[in-house]
Image: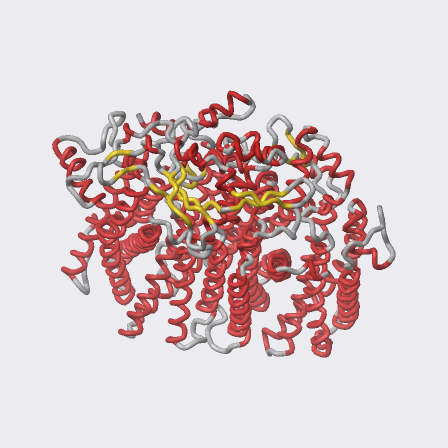
């Protein structure tokens, strides 16, 4: 295990974890914002909900963006050769993601700042584009992640001496892409429902009047979909797990500790504990949400005694996301592409390479795809300390910001 | 003629459609970024005036500017992400090289981004919740984050314009080019020992000076300067035509047997170490070039190498100046429109605010555009004259192929006296002649020999580099910028005159207020032309003297149709943004929300 931790993998894991936690809420919140915006026409309770949700969303999205940028810059600095390779072959999936990111940022800015400046129809069009782009950003990125599971569609053009990606073949034949993508969307929506229920349950117990009433309604509305989502996640998670049987290295690292193994049955790094932890978080929120749903379905007063449990469920939802993502990433360590450990996959890829170049190509791929081969001038002690200092500052400032945003009195609720 | 010039730019160098897409993508980002840099500065100054005067109009202006700043920051972050991924996808070898060798400013830029996000949010959501002084400090830190970010990114761009260690080809004593002597050259620190990996995984250390045929390299133009400070590397000035070829071979994954390196190996040494020969031949060029570049970067300073680019300081002050100028002129246009809308209404207080804001923008605009022309732009021009003489020759069109924008008797006075004085500080200096630049100065002739031996290996002449000289279209881009900037400077001067004459209740004549509608577009055009001169004028180089565009580009380029689609998409977003900002901040007939 000691060899898995170096400055490069540590900073990548750290920024990725923070980013992925926030970005799941970025997928789930836009539909809710648009829904409550429309319910809020002529109803100040829902108007309050829509505005407060959008305000928090804008803050979360900005912070998620910072961590995403940090992640990509770290990736470039620590693993420039991998970025070079990815840049040559992954044009389409990355392009989808970045075009949607650009659209999403613009729509968010227009939606938030233009609240009173657009007609309701125009505002809804912007909101709809916000929702669509939120769902399509992970489409591009999950395609990249699925490619990192199994590089389906990757070919070698012997005439030109280059790798290229057949996108249609990838989409049709990568066994991990569709379960991964659908699991991501449903998981993000479910986690958001739980976190929103938790947040408004807290607000319910700390407010009076209109805010309290609105918060109570939101909690009661969120728990049903959250429960449905949690049940759906069981099946989607199972589907993804089954798809991972195509990559014995990864499957065995995740499930080998429970005795579930495929292929050669070798467990290189045992991450079953992370899967168990994830299941603990998943099941605990399932139980809390189910019990809370039963209790508050009929009366809003039942929220108050369950608020702290719902807060724990919200924390569990975020923890489930982080442990799940870490599990997915760590279980293929030290390889950027998990299937590089599969002799059949490698052999079929190298079969397209002219025999005299196979050794060179194989050696190049193993060099570039190995997380242990990081750029040593980017991990100098000075850089590591600088990174730690700035990230500590960011986290402290982010906490202060959340305090100013949510708790500090003064200012204006409608400061948009 | 325009068609011919455009054709030269698109066809004389590889990857034309990718360059167009990059130009669009980065320009969209740059158009927005200037407001992030400029509006933050103007907001900070407006707040300082408010702290001094306690006049609410200045607080109102601060709030409007901050709102614009935050809106632009959000969009700048989005387009920055698009630009970042665009670079990775279209120019992956450039990105890889940046990550490998000059990663630090890109890495450090993330901390600037963190500062911006944290302080911008705190500034906005903390309005009314924090004390005025604390809030002003946060406003300053938000601005500092943006400026710090620019300082990092511009250092990388400056390095691409003139990398640290470049030795230009134009002799500023004799006023002649020195291509025959192998210039321009790039300074490299060659480690005394090269470590090569054997097929069995073990490593062998080879004395570099014995391995290479130094006399042959010197004959090819290499100059040995001496040892580095640590005494573990030899400092040499290598002709860029050799450097770019080696970098090309490195990113194409060549081994020594397919490289020009085989011609400069000391054959006697290899014969004496016969077992080395097969290993050497199958060694990737990357394994030899990368340690040399890394040694060079280490000796120059891992953290500071890009900041030592000889054009860095001129570049960064020019960028800051451009950002403030663009923001100030846009603001001037915006408040001129407001003035037109409100001059006949009875809201005297709002009109007074509009007048103050216009005056603020006009005075700032006049000061900064003057500084840009006389100081910042001048310094940039001097740096280019020394370190990018080929670009200067194209900018000044010192060629018989093209009609200069300036004709008649002033032309010779301008070219023979004034420009040499401005560029080189002496009226006796001579501008570099475009016609004296060999069309193939960037070709490594050894590549012809290589191609003859193995026809599957392209010589430099076969790589799509039709012309090593910069495209002449930059002459029109540059002078278009200069003339338009002078016009806008005169406009600002007239505006300030009317403000001064009638202060505080001045009236603006129609010819001052009505151009307000066009002002954001005109000032952005000036900026675009300047940026285009800088970027287009560097061709065929991506990193001057080190990497050409064909080396930098992806091996799987998108089709022209796909590129066009993405370009239209990006431009569409920019148009939507412009309309959105207008609606949000400037809905006709309504005062902007304070």
How many labels, in total? 0
Residue B131 visible: yes
Q: In the orientation shown, which residue stands out farthest toward the front?
A: B272
The residue sitting at 69% across, 57% down in the picture is A325
The residue sitting at 62% across, 55% down in the picture is A27
Horizontal and vertical percent for residue A67?
56, 59
The residue sitting at 64% across, 45% down in the picture is A367
Residue toward you, A42 or B381:
B381
Q: Is residue A21 above or below residue B377?
A: below
Q: Which corner quadrant holds the N terminus of chain A?
A: bottom right
B83 relative to B35 in the view: left or right: right
The residue sitting at 79% across, 51% down in the picture is A251
Figure quadrant of residue B242 = top left
Residue toward you, B289 or A53:
B289
Residue A41 visible: no
B120 relative to B254 in the view: left or right: left
């Amino acid at each position: 295990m000691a060899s898995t931790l170096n400055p490069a993998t540590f900073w990548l894991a750290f920024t990725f974890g923070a980013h992925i936690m926030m970005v799941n809420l970025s997928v789930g919140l836009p539909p809710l914002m648009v829904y409550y915006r429309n319910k809020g026409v002529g109803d100040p309770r829902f108007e309050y909900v829509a505005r407060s949700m959008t305000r928090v969303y804008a803050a979360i999205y900005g912070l998620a963006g910072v961590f995403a940028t940090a992640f990509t810059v770290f990736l470039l600095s620590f693993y420039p050769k991998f970025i070079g390779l990815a840049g040559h072959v992954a044009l389409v999936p990355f392009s989808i993601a970045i075009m949607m990111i650009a659209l999403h940022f613009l729509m968010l800015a227009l939606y938030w700042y233009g609240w009173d400046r657009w007609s309701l129809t125009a505002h809804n069009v912007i909101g709809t584009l916000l929702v669509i782009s939120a769902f399509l950003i992970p489409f591009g990125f999950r395609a990249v992640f699925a490619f990192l599971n199994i590089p389906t569609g990757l070919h070698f053009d012997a005439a030109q001496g280059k790798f290229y990606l057949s996108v249609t073949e990838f989409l049709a034949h990568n066994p991990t892409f569709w379960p991964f993508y659908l699991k991501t969307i449903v998981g993000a929506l479910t986690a958001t429902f739980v976190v929103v229920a938790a947040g408004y349950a807290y607000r319910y117990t700390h407010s009076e009047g209109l805010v309290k009433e609105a918060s109570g309604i939101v909690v009661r509305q969120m728990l049903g979909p959250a429960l449905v989502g949690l049940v759906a996640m069981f099946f989607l998670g199972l589907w993804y797990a089954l798809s991972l049987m195509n990559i014995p290295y990864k499957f065995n690292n995740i499930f080998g500790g429970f005795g579930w193994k495929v292929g050669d049955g070798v467990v290189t790094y045992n991450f079953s504990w992370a899967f168990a932890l994830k299941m603990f978080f998943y099941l605990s929120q399932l139980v809390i949400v189910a019990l809370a749903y039963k209790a508050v379905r009929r009366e809003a007063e039942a929220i108050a005694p369950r608020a702290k449990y719902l807060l724990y469920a919200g924390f569990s939802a975020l923890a489930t996301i982080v442990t799940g993502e870490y599990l997915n990433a760590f279980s293929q360590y030290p390889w950027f592409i998990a299937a590089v450990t599969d002799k059949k996959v490698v052999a079929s890829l190298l079969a397209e390479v002219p025999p005299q170049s196979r050794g060179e190509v194989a050696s190049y791929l193993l060099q570039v795809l190995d997380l242990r081969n990081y750029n040593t001038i980017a991990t100098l002690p000075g850089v590591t300390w600088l990174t730690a200092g700035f990230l500590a500052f960011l986290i402290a400032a982010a906490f202060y910001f959340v305090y100013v945003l949510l708790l500090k009195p003064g200012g204006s609720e409608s400061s948009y | 003629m325009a068609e011919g010039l455009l054709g030269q730019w698109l066809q004389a160098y590889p990857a034309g459609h990718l360059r167009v897409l990059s130009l669009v993508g980065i320009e969209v980002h740059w158009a927005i970024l200037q407001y992030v840099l400029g509006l933050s500065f103007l907001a900070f100054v407006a707040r300082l005036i408010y702290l001094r005067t306690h006049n609410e109009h200045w607080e109102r202006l601060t709030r409007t500017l901050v709102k614009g700043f935050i809106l632009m920051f959000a969009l700048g972050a989005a387009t920055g992400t698009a630009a970042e991924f665009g670079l990775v996808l279209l120019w992956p070898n450039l990105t890889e090289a940046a990550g490998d060798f000059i990663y630090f400013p890109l890495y450090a830029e993330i901390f600037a981004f963190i500062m911006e996000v944290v302080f911008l949010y705190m500034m906005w959501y903390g309005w009314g919740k924090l004390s005025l002084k604390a809030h002003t400090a946060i406003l300053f830190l938000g601005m500092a984050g943006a400026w710090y970010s620019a300082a990092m990114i511009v250092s990388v761009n400056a390095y691409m314009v003139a990398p640290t260690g470049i030795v230009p080809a134009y002799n500023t004593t004799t006023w002649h080019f020195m291509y025959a002597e192998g210039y321009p050259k790039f300074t490299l620190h060659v480690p005394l020992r090269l470590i090569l990996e054997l097929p069995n995984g073990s490593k062998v250390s080879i004395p570099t000076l014995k391995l290479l045929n130094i006399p042959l390299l010197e004959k090819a133009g290499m100059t040995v300067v001496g040892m580095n400070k640590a005494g573990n590397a030899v400092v040499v000035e290598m002709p860029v035509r050799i450097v770019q070829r080696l970098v090309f071979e490195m990113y194409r994954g060549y081994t020594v047997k397919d490289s020009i390196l085989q011609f400069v190996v000391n054959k006697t040494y290899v014969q004496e170490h016969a077992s080395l020969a097969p290993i050497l031949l199958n060694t990737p060029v990357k394994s030899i070039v990368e340690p040399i570049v890394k040694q060079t970067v280490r000796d120059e300073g891992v953290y500071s190498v890009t900041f030592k680019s000889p054009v860095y300081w001129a570049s960064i002050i020019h960028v800051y100046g451009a950002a403030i100028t663009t923001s100030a002129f846009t603001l001037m246009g915006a408040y001129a429109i407001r003035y037109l809308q409100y001059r006949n209404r009875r809201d005297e207080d709002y009109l007074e605010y509009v007048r103050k804001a216009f005056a603020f923008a006009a005075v700032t605009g006049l000061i900064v555009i003057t500084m840009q022309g006389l100081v910042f732009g001048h310094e940039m021009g001097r740096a280019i004259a020394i370190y990018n003489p080929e670009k200067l020759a194209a900018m000044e069109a010192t060629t018989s192929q093209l009609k200069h924008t300036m004709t008649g008797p002033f032309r010779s006075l301008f070219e023979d006296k004034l420009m040499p004085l401005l560029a080189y500080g002496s009226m006796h200096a001579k501008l570099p002649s475009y016609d004296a630049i060999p069309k193939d100065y960037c070709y490594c002739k050894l590549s012809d020999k290589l191609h003859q031996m193995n026809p599957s290996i392209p010589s430099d002449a076969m790589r799509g580099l039709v012309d090593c000289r910069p495209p002449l279209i930059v002459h029109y881009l540059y002078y278009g910028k200069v003339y338009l900037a002078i016009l806008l400077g005169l406009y600002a001067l007239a505006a300030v005159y009317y403000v001064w004459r009638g202060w505080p209740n001045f009236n603006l004549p129609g010819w001052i207020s009505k151009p307000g509608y066009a002002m954001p577009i005109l000032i952005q055009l000036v900026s675009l032309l300047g940026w285009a001169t800088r970027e287009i004028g560097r061709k065929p180089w991506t990193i001057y003297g080190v990497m050409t565009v064909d080396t930098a580009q992806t091996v799987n380029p998108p089709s022209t149709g796909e590129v066009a689609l993405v370009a239209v998409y990006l431009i569409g977003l920019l148009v939507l943004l412009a309309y959105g900002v207008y609606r949000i901040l400037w809905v006709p007939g309504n005062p902007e929300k304070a």
